[in-house]
Amino acid sequence: MDAAKTTERPKRQNAAFKHLMLLHWIMAAFILTLYFTGVFVARPLQAPLWLMSFCHQSLGMLFLLLLIVRIFLLLRVVGHKYTRRSPNVTSNWLQTIMLHSSLYFFMLVAPISGFFLRNFIGLGTTLFGLPVPSLFAANNTWVALARSSHFWSSYLFLAFIVLHALAHWKVIRMTVRKRFVTR
Ligand code: HEM
Ligand code: HEM
């Protein structure tokens, strides 16, 4: 029975899950660049502002578009996983669901608040040269709120990313060992 248990590997590596994880790593690379460029955009004297701002807005807006694809893939993965059996609700499972939901929340709020901030300041937004129409007219009273929303959502997001990376550290170490350490 034990042998059967160990050979029976979870069948979660379906195509949708592989695509979801591919997008996961692409978006993780985007996030790294967004923090780097964001810090320069907020402190313009230290770098060529237009370039940092161009990259920050464009990557941020593309991130938002990729998020739509990611949610679609996630729904396919969840559908595939739970149509035949319902989830085994343990405290571990609930913790993971809460952490992943928080990450999705920040993946949505961080770029949207940045976009709204540009709208309220009265600046246009670009997606690698394509103009993205503003949803709001310039409005001084909303600038401070949008700015602090963008600041706090970005840095809280970072705190959750660190928690998430710590939670998966063992998985990453095992994968690296399995792939790169030959016996
Ligand atoms: C940089 C920002 C990151 C975000 C926003 C993020 C978010 C997520 C989310 C929401 C999931 C659930 C699957 C999905 O819906 O995509 C996930 C899965 C995963 N993440 Fe991350 N992640 C990030 C970075 C990292 C890092 C740095 C590591 C490694 C230390 C990591 C390791 C993993 C692993 C191993 C899984 C698969 C978990 C499973 O098997 O269910 N992630 N991530
Ligand atoms: C996941 C997506 C995003 C992340 C993680 C992110 C992160 C950041 C960070 C860390 C800062 C520096 C904050 C500071 O230290 O004061 C920043 C600044 C800024 N970001 Fe983003 N950003 C994202 C998307 C966007 C988007 C889509 C836009 C606009 C279209 C945008 C517009 C701005 C602006 C205008 C600033 C300067 C804020 C200021 O003047 O204080 N961001 N961002």
Image (spheres, rainbow, N blue to C red):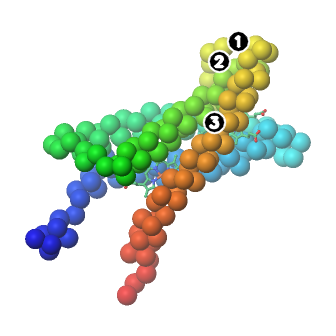
Q: Is residue 170 above or below residue 56?
A: below
**Residue designated by label 1:** 137
Residue drawn at x 49%, y 64% is 169
Residue drawn at x 52%, y 59% is 166
Residue drawn at x 76%, y 21% is 143
For badge 1, the amino acid type reads Ala
Which badge, 1 or 3, comes first in the chain's sequence? Answer: 1
Q: Is residue 18 left or right of residue 56?
A: left
Q: Are the two marked residues, 1 and 2, in contact with CB atoms closer than 8 angstroms?
A: yes
In terms of image quadrants, where is residue 38?
top right
Disc 1 crowd rating (10 Å Cα; few below 14, some 14-19, many 20+) is few
Can residue 58 be seen at all in this image of the molecule? Answer: no
Residue drawn at x 27%, y 54% is 12
Q: Is residue 172 above or below residue 85?
A: below
Q: Position of residue 122 (x, y in %)?
A: 76, 18
Q: Which mark is residue 153?
A: 3
Disc number lying in front (3 or 2): 3
Q: Is residue 67 left or right of residue 20?
A: right
Instruction: Out of 137 and 171, give the one closest to the viewer.
Output: 171
Name the residue at the front extreme.
Answer: 91
Element class at badge 3: helix
For badge 3, the amino acid type reads Ser
Name the residue at the left extreme.
Answer: 1
Q: Would you say the beta carbon of the disc 3 residue lies within 8 angstroms of ligand 2? A: yes
Q: Position of residue 100 (x, y in %)?
A: 45, 44
**Residue designated by label 2:** 134
- Specify the quadrant that holds the C terminus: bottom left
Element class at badge 1: loop
